Amino acid sequence: MPAEQTPEPPRGPGPSSGADGTVVTFRLADPRRELAGVKLRTDVPIASDPLDFRRRGRGWELVIGRPPVTRMEYLLELRRGDGSTAAVTDPGNPLRVAGAFGPKSVCEFPSYAEPGWLSAPYEPGVSQALDLAVPSLGAAIPVLTWAPAGTPDDEPLPLLVVHDGPEYDALASLTRYLAAGVAGDWLPRLRAALLGPGSRDRWYSANASYARALRKLVIPALAGKLATSARIGMGTSLGGLAMLHAQCRYPDAFDALFLQSGSFFTPRSDSQERCFAHYRRVVAFVAGVHAGGLPDRPVPAVLTCGAIEENLENNRLMTRTLLGRGYPAALHEVPDAHNYTAWRDAFDPHLTRLLGRMRP
């Protein structure tokens, strides 16, 4: 998605901007001069980095150029006289969002709007929890199934299989989206299986044992309980990588893929990830995919990624590879970063359209 042509000021309390909207100003009160320094911490690239505040009167101030996003999550790093630091939400800004690593403050710009489905009527649906023991992983994979209320187990429906499922639900309102879509008939009736991440870095990093467990244990267990017409694999970051890895090893695993900000690491674009314990395994798998390792069973694949993410280039490359092998693939770049709100905001229309293809 192209950057906005007209800069805009942020809305609501907290950060403010000048009349032309090209800059954003952050302020923090410090009337007792208890702080030795303040720094802005954000995943959004800022041209004026380093992002150290300057003392202004009875507080601190930082002026930055308006970033090319519609919303920005951030923390303030406070440094005290003894050298200790603490990362906190902005006390002057009540807009906050939960995330995988705790709450953050949010600066929303006028062009940002929450998805309309968040205010749409919906029925919560029915959930059931189960743990599937996997000896090869030395652990159980926790699964939470979801279905529209009143759905019999023997009614064949599409099944959305979701990595990081509990996080997707808690931080991106996934089942609320599904429930609203089914209630409004803009999604087909379907079920979801929310898979807990367990030992996430190990399981989701192109791990052959995990892919085998997913295809040989989890999917059959779900099929034994729930009549299924089609399976859609969904994941974000490493979870998206793991879905593609499972599909490559077991081409009948899924009938469509929805991959958000996939960690498709390559040495050229992701050398900063070398400290990740399973970097070489991920890079080797991704290289194999680009060298022709995709199955000969092309399935629809929809990818989304933040326009300012480090993962953007490798998602663009993966999309080109999928298209080159005949996969009906599309990448949608959204004006945000690597976070659950960005992934939530991309459900509609992108996941909506993909799930619409599964309608009987």
Image (spheres, rainbow, N blue to C red):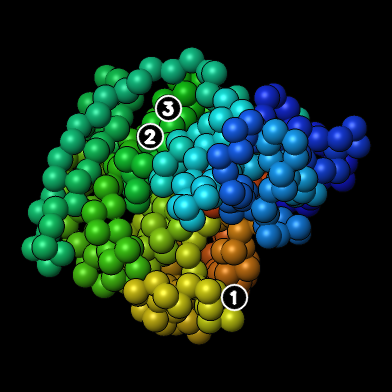
Mark 3 neighbour density, 10 Å: few (under 14) some (14–19) many (20 or more): many
Quote the CA–CA distance across marks 3 and 1.
35 Å
Q: Is residue 279 above or below residue 155?
A: below
Give the Cα distance between marks 2 and 3: 10 Å
Of mark 2 and mark 1, the one earlier in the sequence is 2
**Of callouts 3 and 1, the N-terminal one:** 3
Tag 1 secondary structure: loop
* Mark pair 2, 1: CA separation: 31 Å
Q: Residue at x 22, y 43 (%)?
A: 143
In-image side of 292 versus 323 (left or right): left
Residue corresponding to mark 2: 170
Residue type at mark 3? Arg
The residue to which callout 3 is attached is 176
Instruction: Give the crowd class for mark 2: few <14, some 14-19, many >=20 residues within 10 Å.
Output: some
Q: Which numbered disc covers residue 269?
A: 1
**Circle 3 or circle 1, nearest the eye:** 1
In this rendering, does residue 5 appear at all?
yes
Amino acid beneath label 2:
Ala
Residue 212 in the image: x percent, y percent?
Answer: 22, 67
